[in-house]
């Protein structure tokens, strides 16, 4: 008996297939590693397409790196962390570098590591080596958040 599992992702469906449930479960155990590879490939292609224009008015690229240009009142620490991850795509950001960028932006936050953990737990970010990057879902979330901040953007309820 063949067993097939279909997972719906923002960029399409992924199917895992096996001769029995145990075989599919074994493949599922390897899946998080493959998901990181797939998300990384898609994010590299997205950046090549010039998606960073969405950050205009929110982030300024300086010689020190990306700096948030909006006030603390307009962004949560979680949003600030995610936007900086977006701005640093595709190379990702190490926690120490993220702390420096947050400080340059006026977002002094000792709890930023917790925000990284939240983003990772929610499937919006992942860790590769010692750097954090956004997943495709994380990029979509940042884009929606940034669009809602701009004049005429989506208003949250």
Image (cartoon, rainbow, N blue to C red):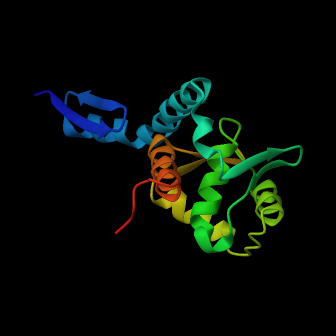
Horizontal and vertical percent for residue 157?
34, 69
Q: Quadrant of residue 97?
A: bottom right
- Please identify the residue farthest to the right as the structure is shown: 63
Which residue is depicted at the point 76% across and 63% down?
102
Which residue is depicted at the point 68% across and 74% down?
111
With 97 as the anchor, is 15 left or right in this view?
Answer: left
- Please identify the residue farthest to the front as the structure is shown: 152
Q: Quadrant of residue 113?
A: bottom right
Question: 122 or 27: nearer the eye?
Answer: 122
Quadrant location of the N terminus in the rendered image: top left
Q: Can residue 14 be seen here?
A: yes
Question: 128 or 149: nearer the eye?
Answer: 149
The answer to whether 57 is drawn above or below residue 43 in the figure is below
Horizontal and vertical percent for residue 45?
55, 24
Horizontal and vertical percent for residue 124?
49, 52
Horizontal and vertical percent for residue 60?
75, 48
């Amino acid at each position: 008996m063949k067993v097939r599992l279909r997972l719906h992702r923002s960029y399409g469906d992924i199917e895992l297939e096996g001769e029995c449930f145990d075989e599919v479960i074994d493949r599922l155990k390897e899946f998080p590693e493959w998901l990181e590879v797939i998300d990384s490939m898609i994010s590299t292609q997205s950046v090549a397409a010039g998606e960073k224009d969405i950050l205009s008015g929110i982030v300024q690229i300086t010689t020190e790196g990306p700096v948030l240009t909006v006030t603390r009142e307009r962004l949560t620490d979680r949003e600030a962390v995610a936007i900086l991850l977006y701005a640093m795509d595709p190379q990702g950001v190490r926690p120490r570098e993220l702390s420096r960028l947050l400080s340059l932006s006026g977002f002094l936050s000792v709890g930023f590591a917790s925000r990284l953990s939240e983003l990772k737990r929610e499937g919006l970010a992942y860790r590769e080596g010692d750097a954090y990057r956004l997943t495709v879902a994380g990029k979509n979330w940042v884009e929606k958040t940034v669009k809602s901040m701009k004049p005429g953007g989506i208003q949250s309820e």
